[in-house]
């Protein structure tokens, strides 16, 4: 008999084992949800699973610990941890007496989300701004060189559309800054526990 009791009734080893199985299944299911959701932000499912394992770990883990838990190569673990670190979702930590690098998740999901969101959207928005600028520049050159009146009308309409897009991207960059600086929480406060 295991020394577990519920209101004075001893629990059998079999019952304790079933309870742990249910617990592990529930956590595994949620880790899958995390992995699936992170895929929406361009993070692979395997890196999402890595984050989930780290999140539910009772203590910081080494790359070897993670490799064992996920049955992935050390190289994959290292790449995944690096990606999560760059997104400020995982941080390295130190524990006296342990020479290997230890990793743990950033506990503030709000901070992780704003960092991830800002990072991803900033990259795409900056690319879109550059593309719109280049398109306007090219269209203006064609506009100056052509004598075709119908083409001039079309180009002017398209330049107007591109100016609208540029204004949208400028607004989006402001929104991204509000996310990255945490100012967003002045408008939409974090939920308290």
Image (cartoon, rainbow, N blue to C red):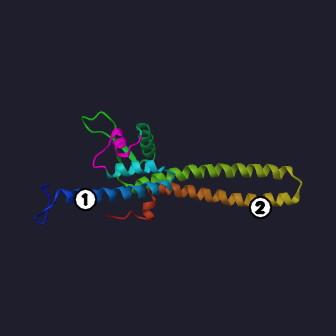
CA neighbours of label 1 inside 10 A, class few (<14), some (14 to 19), many (20+) = few
Nearest to the observer: residue 124 or residue 4: 4
Residue drawn at (43%, 62%) of the image: 186
In the orientation shown, which residue stands out farthest toward the right? 147
Measured in 3D between alpha carbons, the distance from the residue under mark 2 to the one under mark 1, in whole angstroms, is 68 Å
Nearest the viewer among 72 and 80 is: 72
Q: Quadrant of residue 174?
A: bottom right
The crowding category of the residue bearing disc 2, from other C-alpha atoms within 10 Å (few below 14, some 14 to 19, many at least 20), is: few
Helix, strand or loop at disc 1? Answer: helix
Residue drawn at 39 percent across, 62 percent down: 190
Q: Quadrant of the N terminus?
A: bottom left
Determine if the magenta segment contains residue 66: yes
Residue nearer the viewer, 146 or 47? 47
Which disc number belongs to residue 18? 1
State if disc 1 and disc 2 touch (CB < 8 Å). Answer: no
Could you tell me which quadrant the C terminus lies in?
Answer: bottom left
Horizontal relation, residue 76 to residue 172: left or right: left
Residue drawn at x 28%, y 57% is: 21
105 vs 21: above or below? above
Q: Position of residue 163 (x, y in %)?
A: 69, 58
Q: Secondary structure at mark 2?
A: helix
> Which of labels 2 and 1 is toward the front?
1
Q: Is residue 151 left or right of residue 56?
A: right
Q: Position of residue 192 (x, y in %)?
A: 33, 64
Horizontal and vertical percent for residue 112? 42, 53
Name the mark on residue 157: 2
Q: Earlier in the sequence, mark 2 or mark 1?
A: 1
Identify the magenta region: 57-72
């Amino acid at each position: 008999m295991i020394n577990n009791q519920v209101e004075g009734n001893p629990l059998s080893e079999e019952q304790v084992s079933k309870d742990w199985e249910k617990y592990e299944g529930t956590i595994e299911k949620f880790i899958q949800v995390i992995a699936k959701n992170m895929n929406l932000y361009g993070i692979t499912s395997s890196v999402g699973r890595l984050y989930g394992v780290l999140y539910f770990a009772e203590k910081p883990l080494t790359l070897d610990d993670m490799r064992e838990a996920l049955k992935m190569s050390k190289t994959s673990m290292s790449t995944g941890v690096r990606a999560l670190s760059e997104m400020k979702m995982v941080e390295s930590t130190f524990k006296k007496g342990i020479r290997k690098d230890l990793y743990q998740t950033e506990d503030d999901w709000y901070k992780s989300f704003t960092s991830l969101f800002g990072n991803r959207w900033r990259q795409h928005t900056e690319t879109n701004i550059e593309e719109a600028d280049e398109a306007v520049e090219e269209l203006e050159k064609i506009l100056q060189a052509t004598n075709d009146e119908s083409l001039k009308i079309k180009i002017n309409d398209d330049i107007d559309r591109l100016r609208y897009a540029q204004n949208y991207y400028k607004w989006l960059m402001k929104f991204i800054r509000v996310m990255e600086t945490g100012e967003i929480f002045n408008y939409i406060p974090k939920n308290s526990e």
